[in-house]
Amino acid sequence: MNQTKKLVTQIIEGIQEKKGHNIVVADLTEIEDTICNYFVICQGNSPSQVSVIADSVWDFAHQGAGEKPTAIDGVQNAQWIAMDYSDVLVHIFLPETRTFYNLENLWADAKLTHIPNID
């Protein structure tokens, strides 16, 4: 498994560990001139859950794949936290913020993989 796919797997595990849901992986590798190879998009039910998911992603990516984000944005209001791992961008949303920005539709050309929720 290459490093980027290992990182995506660790990110998904970090999201699932804190009950993040509606996880979608957008594979952008076939699209020209993109800023990264993958988007991992998910949501939490409250600002505190969004923050906890981001912390869990950080831990899982660091421990499981040896990766740290080059930037994290949105931590203050925790409606949308973006974590930049260069090849992978993680987007952790509140439901209404996710609906408003609708990244899955914006990147409709990408191959979208829906990860089943763990209940």
Image (cartoon, helix red, strand yellow):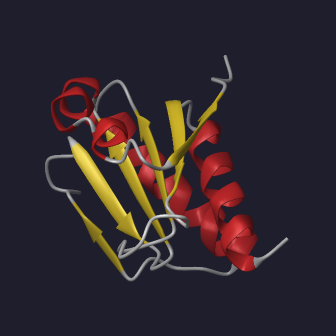
Question: Which residue does the image show at 68% across and 81% down from the upper left?
Answer: 66
Q: The C terminus lies in which quarter of the figure?
A: top right
Task: Classify residue 55 as left or right of residue 102.
Answer: right
Task: Classify residue 59 as left or right of residue 52.
Answer: right
Instruction: Point out residue 95 in the picture as x, y percentages from the top left corner.
Output: 28, 25
Q: The N terminus lies in which quarter of the figure?
A: bottom right
Question: Which residue does the image show at 47% across and 75% down from the upper left?
Answer: 85
Instruction: Point out residue 91 in the picture as x, y percentages from the top left corner.
Output: 37, 51
Quadrant hosting residue 65: bottom right
Instruction: Point out residue 67 in the picture as x, y percentages from the top left corner.
Output: 60, 80
- Residue lying furthest top: 119
Count of all numbered marks drawn on residues in the image: 0
Instruction: Point out residue 33 in the picture as x, y percentages from the top left corner.
Output: 35, 76
Compared to residue 84, the image places residue 17 above or below, namely above
Quadrant hosting residue 50: top left
Question: Which residue does the image show at 60% across and 56% down from the upper left?
Answer: 11
